[in-house]
Image (tube, rainbow, N blue to C red):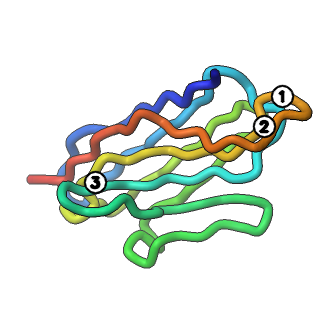
């Protein structure tokens, strides 16, 4: 089973930046979409950003501050987060919809989550 491994979370002051990385343990045969979600304490998981063949979309709360990018050849997705705010504090999860090998169904892969805390 392919696993997604996240890194790059941590504690940052308001206005600071972080870059999250999510790498698959094996290279996927094909990728349909890559995305980042987040879940703050007491709140539902929400979509932060997604990139696929139709383009890239962001939650209104992060537009202009966050940038998602993917490297299909490396089966890796990134999230560059700038101008961070305390309300960005959450556990961030990566998500890749992909086929691990030719002929197998699409599967929804999730990372284990990485904590991002924005505080002075």
The residues tagged by marks 1 and 3 sit, at their Cα atoms, a distance apart of 39 Å
Mark 1 and 3 residues: CB-CB less than 8 Å, in contact?
A: no
Picture quadrant of residue 87 = bottom left
2 and 1 marks in contact (CB < 8 Å)? yes
Q: Which residue is disc 3 drawn over?
A: 16
Categorize mark 2 by other alpha carbons within 10 Å: few (<14), some (14-19), many (20+).
some
> Can you tell which mark lies on residue 101?
1
Q: Residue furthest left?
A: 120
Query: Could you tell me which residue is drawn at 19 percent across and 55 percent down?
Result: 41
Q: CA distance from mark 2 to mark 3?
A: 36 Å
Query: At 79% from the left edge and 61% from the top edge, which residue is drawn?
Result: 53
The alpha-carbon separation of the residues under discs 2 and 1 comes to 6 Å
Which quarter of the image is occupied by the N terminus? Answer: top right
Looking at the image, residue 7 sits to the left or right of residue 84; the answer is right
Q: In this rendering, would 5 be left or right of 105?
A: left
In the rendered view, would you say 46 is above or below 109?
below
Against 54, residue 111 (above or below) is: above
Could you say whether the residue bearing mark 1 is in a helix, strand or loop?
A: loop
Task: Say which label, 2 or 3, has the lower sequence index.
Answer: 3
Q: Which mark is residue 99?
A: 2
Quadrant for residue 7, please give it. Answer: top left
Question: Residue sitting at 69 percent across and 53 percent down?
Answer: 33
Residue 37 at x, y percent in the picture: 44, 55
Residue at image position (83%, 34%) is 104
> Foreground: 105 or 54?
105
For discs 2 and 3, the disc positioned in front in the rendered view:
2
Query: Measured from the top left, where is residue 20 in percent x and y?
Result: 44, 42
Between 73 and 91, the one nearer to me in the picture: 91
- From the viewer's perspective, tell me whether residue 14 is left or right of residue 96: left
Sequence-first disc among 1 and 3: 3
Residue at the right extreme, as displayed: 103
Q: SS of the residue at dot 3? A: loop
């Amino acid at each position: 089973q392919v696993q997604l491994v996240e890194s790059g979370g941590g504690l940052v002051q308001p206005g600071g930046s972080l870059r999250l990385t999510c790498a698959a343990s094996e290279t996927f045969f094909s990728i349909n979409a890559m995305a980042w979600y987040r879940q703050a304490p007491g709140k539902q998981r929400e979509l932060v950003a997604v990139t696929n063949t139709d383009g890239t979309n962001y939650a209104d709360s992060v537009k202009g501050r966050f940038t998602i990018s993917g490297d299909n050849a490396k089966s890796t997705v990134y999230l560059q987060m700038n101008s961070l705010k305390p309300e960005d504090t959450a556990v961030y999860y990566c998500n890749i919809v992909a086929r691990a090998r030719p002929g197998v169904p699409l599967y929804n892969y999730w990372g284990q989550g990485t904590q991002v805390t924005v505080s002075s």
